[in-house]
Image (tube, helix red, strand yellow):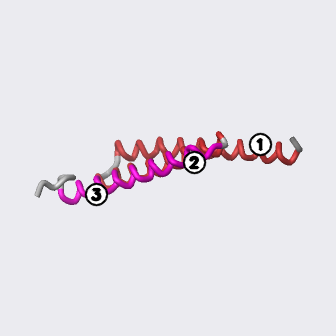
Amino acid sequence: MTDALKFTESILDITLNIGFIMIAISLALLMYQIIIGPNNANRAIALDTIGVSLMAVAGLMSIQLVTVKLNDIVLLIGILAFLGTVGIAKYYEEGVIIDRD
């Protein structure tokens, strides 16, 4: 390997590690927001943001492992986070998730 390639790889490793650390801090603060949050709307936003953070973790893992197989996981997490957000919003608005009428 050339020196430039080694340097680029070391910069990528450092950047990925910083990204993982920042996302871990973000997840810890979001868990605090879910537990202590002032109201249910803030808790719902924190849950949605946790979904986005998990997508970021899967994306960073995909880069670190040099694979594209985790991209499907990112899409799946995004779809599930969206459905969860819709369900939570409907529950807050109507009090039930599934209408029987």
Q: Quadrant of the C terminus?
A: bottom left
Q: Which mark is residue 89?
A: 3
Residue at 67 percent across and 43 percent down: it is 66
The residue labelled by disc 2 is 59
Which residue is more in the foreground, 83 or 48?
A: 83
Q: Residue lying furthest left in this view?
A: 101
The magenta region covers: 67-94
Q: Earlier in the sequence, mark 3 or mark 1?
A: 1
Which residue is more in the foreground, 42 or 12?
A: 12
Say whether residue 69 is magenta.
yes
Crowdedness of circle 1 by 10 Å Cα count: few (<14), some, many (20+)?
Answer: few
Residue type (three-letter) at the residue carrying disc 1: Ser
Crowdedness of circle 3 by 10 Å Cα count: few (<14), some, many (20+)?
Answer: some
Q: Earlier in the sequence, mark 1 or mark 2?
A: 1
Q: Secondary structure at mark 3?
A: helix
Residue at 47 percent across and 41 percent down: it is 28
Q: Secondary structure at mark 2?
A: helix
Residue type (three-letter) at the residue carrying disc 2: Gly
Q: Residue lying furthest right in this view?
A: 2
Q: What predominant SS class does the magenta segment belong to?
A: helix
What is the spatial separation of the Cα atoms under label 2 and label 3, in whole angstroms? Answer: 27 Å
Total numbered badges shown on the rendered structure:
3
The residue labelled by disc 1 is 10
